[in-house]
Amino acid sequence: MNLENIKKEYENLVKEIQDEKSLYDLRVKFLGKKGVLTEIMKGAKDLLPEERPVFGKAINEIKEFINNHLEETKQKLIDSAINAKLASEEIDVTLPAKKENLGGINPLNKVIEEIEELFISMGYSVAEGPEVETDKFNFEMLNLPKNHPARDMQDSFYITNELLMRTQTSPVQAREMLKAEGRGPIKIICPGKVYRRDNDDATHSHQFTQIEGLVVDKNITFSDLKGTLEYLIKSLFGENKKIRLRPSFFPFTEPSVEVDISWGNEDDEENIKWLEILGAGMVHPNVLKMAGFNPEEYSGFAFGMGPERIAMLKYGISDIRSFYTNDIRFLEQFSSDRND
Ligand code: DAH
């Protein structure tokens, strides 16, 4: 084969090459130890001495040509592989961005957590009790014997004669007192779900939340209760808020009060507007006694509030059902990027 043909053959073959592996094979075929050019070199020994340098030079030229060309081709292959990769991974910055929806904490849970933290900072612990409760704990241990008229205040979902969905978080009071076996102090709050046979509307729900509070110790007085509630209300709603206690009735407290929060005209003593916000009182001696505490030695206060009502006032929410229906338009108003 003459040298011109070798070059042509190389040029034909190299045109087809698509990848580095085939390019390497082509190098071996032409420049390798057993390659085409090595074979041709062997033929030099049959030439006349004066022909050899010319032949050698021509071979070297073609070797150099092929070698350089292989290098260039290799570089081109590498470049085009990089370009193909870049093209396939191209990011189109002009595409409209995908909207990331940030989750928000339900305002009801926000309020519950805020109240928990407040009481924890005052040395309370958080207690829990069952939602399916016995008549004994939901009513009897709270000084509401069977057929007591005050039971009507809390229309109940009964499961059997003795079992019901708890109507209040107050039964946790009795459970915690029994656990303490007649020895104080007890300082707890109990958040949880409660159930009542109510028709759902903007201000009623058959299932809602309560937070119960209970303190039992020696020398607990009504002013401890008032101071605690005042601190709670000011922390939740602001230092300018005032509270007002009105006499009321709960079977498990004596005396009992309903607590109002000032809601406007705070600077004009005569014309302050008031809203009811929670119920409270001094733990009834019968309740202490039934739960194993000596009312001569121990006293206590208790309170119960509805975090839904607190959240509605705090955030200006007008329909209690908004807390439960998972409407994203409602919930996203409380997502962390807007509120925290
Ligand atoms: N359990 C009462 C209710 O559901 C609320 C309540 C009032 C709880 C006074 C208390 C309390 O602990 O002292 O209406």
Image: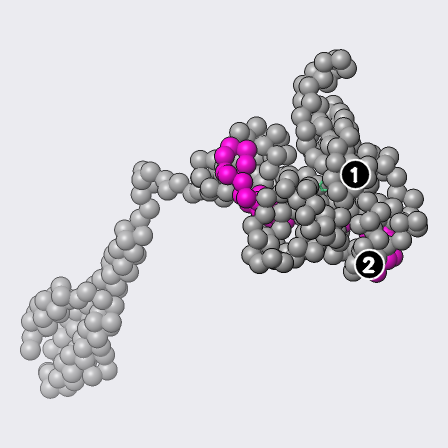
Considering every residue shown, the one lying at the far front of the view is 147
User: Which corner quadrant holds the N terminus?
Assistant: bottom left
Q: Nearer the viewer, residue 160 or 264?
A: 160
Q: Nearer the viewer, residue 147 or 68?
A: 147
Please tell me the numbered disc located at residue 281: 1
Question: Is residue 220 covered in magenta?
Answer: no
Which residue is painted at 64% across and 56% down in the image? 133
Can residue 22 be seen by looking at this rendering? Answer: yes
- The C terminus lies in quadrant: top right
Q: Give the amino acid at mark 1.
A: Gly
Q: How is the image coloured?
A: one colour
Choose mark 1 or mark 2, whichever is in front: 1
In the image, residue 121 lies at what x, y percent? 77, 44
Magenta residues? 180-209
Labels 1 and 2: the sequence-earlier one? 2
- Quick one: SS at disc 1? strand
Q: Is residue 310 above or below residue 100?
A: above
Kindly state the secondary structure of the residue where label 2 is placed. Answer: helix
Calculate the distance from the C-alpha at mark 1 to the C-alpha at mark 2: 21 Å
Task: Say if disc 1 is inside 8 Å of ligand 1.
Answer: yes
